[in-house]
Image (spheres, helix red, strand yellow):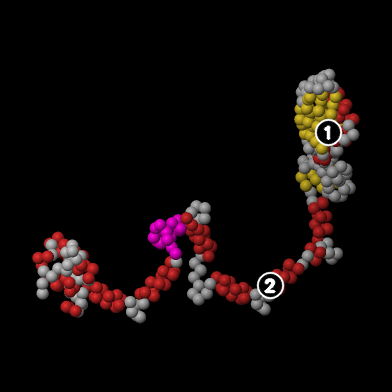
Amino acid sequence: MPDTQMLSKYLPKKLYNAAADEDGTDLTALSGLANERLDVLEDWVGDYAAPAKGSESDIATDLKKVYADVETDETGLLARAGVLEAAVGTYSGENDIAGDLQTVFNDVEADETGLLARATALETMIGDYTPEDTDLATDLAKVYGDVETAGTGLLARAAALEAREIRNIYDSETGLLARAAALEAVAPTTGAPITAQVSATAITSDGNDDEITWTAVANGEDGNGISIDITLSAEANGIDITVDGKAIAVDVKTGQGTTATDVLTAVNAHETAGLLVQGELTGLGDAITADSVVTDGGVDITAGLAGAIRYEADKIWISVGESTASVSNWKYAALL
């Protein structure tokens, strides 16, 4: 059989027509087939040289047979491909699925989320727990069931303890709280008690000619934290005083030379400020200067129930009656 007839037999129509003359006439003789065009056809066909059915087959026929052999009830490739396509959905990423999944993983396992570190921490806490047919929740429920049985009665016993209130401990029979307080009252404590309140003080313009010492009216610790803020205004003579809680603001008009004595007198006589502090001139009473201070150093008497005992190297102290922050009943005896 001529070569061109062999080609027309084995090649699909589309390939064969590629070897036709430009006017469309089929080639039936070797002389009409240029070597260059024959080379192209041979490149397309490749090493195909054994049709499945000899002279009764060509490439197109054989490819169809291969496809039919692959897509059978046993292989179900088309159906399986359909399932895969449905699972992938409308994925249309710029990369492939594997590449994009790696990107997602990198975004998840970041310093901000630390999922791997957190998973490692959980694994460490769980330890070498390796259940065969169960999980943690099931096994914990089993442990709970084994612990809370009629024999142990742990839940009932815990509930009974929780139900007990302080009055069940502190009652007329035991009197535990009262007895503990009595012991604390008479248990010796080291150090001498403070037997007199110390008033809180503050000094404005300390060390200058307009120095004033302010003493809190309230004795002891209650006199701490009173602020006195003196400011100056270059206006006509006068003194404005305002009080907010424990804060005293004194605005001094210095147009006619207001002195420290003027400020002292005004604050002491003020209906509110005078109830918080009283001032004493400890300088020369010269022209006032601006300053801001807060009272401190106030101390209360050492409290103690009647019979309370304290001691130091050469004395023993006893509170012969109840001593409070403002009333002292402390007495002492020298130790021999």
Asked if the residues shown at circle 1 and circle 2 are in contact, with their CB atoms under 8 angstroms apart, the answer is no
Q: Is residue 314 above or below residue 279?
A: below
Residue holding disc 1: 242
Residue holding disc 2: 155
Please tell me which residue is depicted at 86% across the width and 30% down the height of the picture: 267
- Choose between 301 and 315: the one closer to the eye: 301
**Percent x, y for residue 77?**
35, 74
Please tell me which residue is depicted at 42% across the width and 59% down the height of the picture: 93
What is the CA distance from the residue labelled 1 to the residue labelled 2? 64 Å
Is 50 covered by the magenta stretch? no
The region drawn magenta spans 90-106
Is 102 covered by the magenta stretch? yes
Residue 318, visible in the rendered structure: no
- Tell me the SS state at disc 1: strand
- Choose between 227 and 102: the one closer to the eye: 102
- Tell me the SS state at disc 2: helix
Residue 235, visible in the rendered structure: yes
Q: Amino acid at mark 2?
A: Leu
